[in-house]
Amino acid sequence: MLILCDFEKYRYLTSLFDRPDFKRMLKDIECGKIDCVVTKDLSRLGRNYSMTGYYTDEYFPEQHCRYIAINDGVDTMGANNDFAAFHNVINEYYPRDISKKVRQVKRTNAEKGMFMGSRAPYGYKKSPEDKHKLIIDEDTSWVVKKIFGKFINGENARMIADDLNNMNLLCPRAYYYQLQGKDNPRKDESMTWSSATIMQIIQKQVYIGDLVQGQRQVVSFKSKKRRLTEPDEWIIVKGTHEPIISRDIWDEAQKIRKGRYYPRNERKDKTDTIFIGLVKCADCGATMCASMRGRQPKLTYRCGTYSNHGKNVCTSHNIREEVLEAIVLNDIRHYAYIASQDKDYLIKSISKMLSKDKESESNIMLKELKKAESKVEEINISIKSLYKDKVTGKISEKIFYNLLEDFENELKNCENTASVLREKLDIKAATKSEISLFTDRISKCLDLTSMNKFLARELIESITVSAYYKVDGETTQDVDINYKFVGNLKNLEINFLKQAM
């Protein structure tokens, strides 16, 4: 039976190989549903020389899938495909040349003071008469004025964001999607005002009537990734549109910002953040950010989610680095002492604890894996049945594609779940040699008096910090240390009487 499927109904750049339907086609090839792919010519498969060559020379033959490019006379079942490589080189030149010309035109227009962004900055909108001209959006410009007013009157970014959230004002992202009549693809806390959003607005020169463009640049025409450009590469044209904020207010805001916040590069030079990247929020799992706080600045870790989105999403979980360092030092010296007394006993105790934890966890994951694999099998049967119904005319093409999309989304979720569970089950409990390596490292820390970045990363996988809570009227906070190879040792059973013997 011959079944024809159209896998590219929408226009995408063929220099990119992450097109949605292209990925769907590859998936069907790997599942054995497709054994032949036909395109008008090689450029329809792709305009990336190396990637197109990979698919025609390696991928399709390995998958036992025939590929035909009609106009170029390419057939992977044939022997005469010598000119395919030349076609691929020529096909890649076209998007490379177009990309270069488009970038040059955009830069020239930006230098003329034309707005080249895809969406107007919050507080502005594109002029109906000229999409390259910004005009004030009366619905949101007052919010921008309010933000600057509060900032120069002493409120910080977090306070301003909380105030706007309490007023139920749409943040820039939410406002944009409402105007477009679209659903937000990221239905999370990004739809609330955050301190990061406030600081972005405070720093934008656009609000005093100047255009600053070219701050990001596409890495290559073959990639969607962008890089931040250096300030001397920016295109700044003053007085291109009506300002929302006066230059005096903007200058005052920048003065306050520079006095109140350390620039990122200065922060890295002036502070030795020992545990940066290792400290996690116990509630939301976010990495805790390090910053200098107070009149006499002390390095403090704070939940990243709270910093950006406020107490409605998570709490601060604040902990000063000097406090955290003392806790970590005490814990390390504790296990260093045990290792110095009887290293073999410590190794056996850790092995026993990990084996007990692993067995219990594995049983739960095995049940979840069987459930996910069973669901995958059911969905695959349903998809096969769906194809038969389409071929026999029981369902229309529109219904077919709608149902297929639902099935494939569900299948993807189940397969991802199963894959994650298999990976977790494949991770064996730490071997005796790994536990021995941990005890060797920590035994050297018996007389340790201070931490450093190198030692922290050598010994520690992560540190989770809880919110403050009260016990018998006293405020306390939990800090759990997950060590390399052995994890969290808080459940480790140590018989100190035996140690002393």
Image (tube, rainbow, N blue to C red):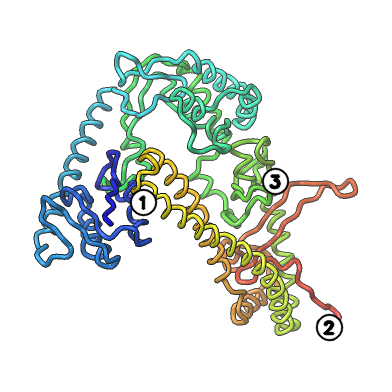
Which residue sits at x=46%, y=57%?
A: 381
Identify the disc placed on residue 498. 2
Crowd around label 3: few <14 · some 14–19 · many ≥20 (10 Å): many
**244 or 292, which lies in front?**
244
Which residue sits at x=44%, y=21%?
A: 207
- Please tell me whether mark 3 or mark 1 is closer to you in this view: 1
Measured from the top left, where is residue 185 in percent x and y? 48, 37
Distance from Cα at disc 3 to Cα at disc 1: 43 Å
Crowd around label 2: few <14 · some 14–19 · many ≥20 (10 Å): few
Circle 3 residue: 317
Distance from Cα at disc 2 to Cα at disc 3: 38 Å
Q: Which numbered disc, 1 or 2, marks the residue that appears first in the sequence?
A: 1
Q: Which numbered disc, 3 or 1, marks the residue that appears first in the sequence?
A: 1
Measured from the top left, where is residue 219 in percent x and y? 31, 46
Q: Can you tell which quarter of the image residue 150 is in? A: top right
Q: Is residue 407 visible?
A: yes
Circle 1 residue: 24
Q: Please name the amino acid that badge 3 sits on.
A: His
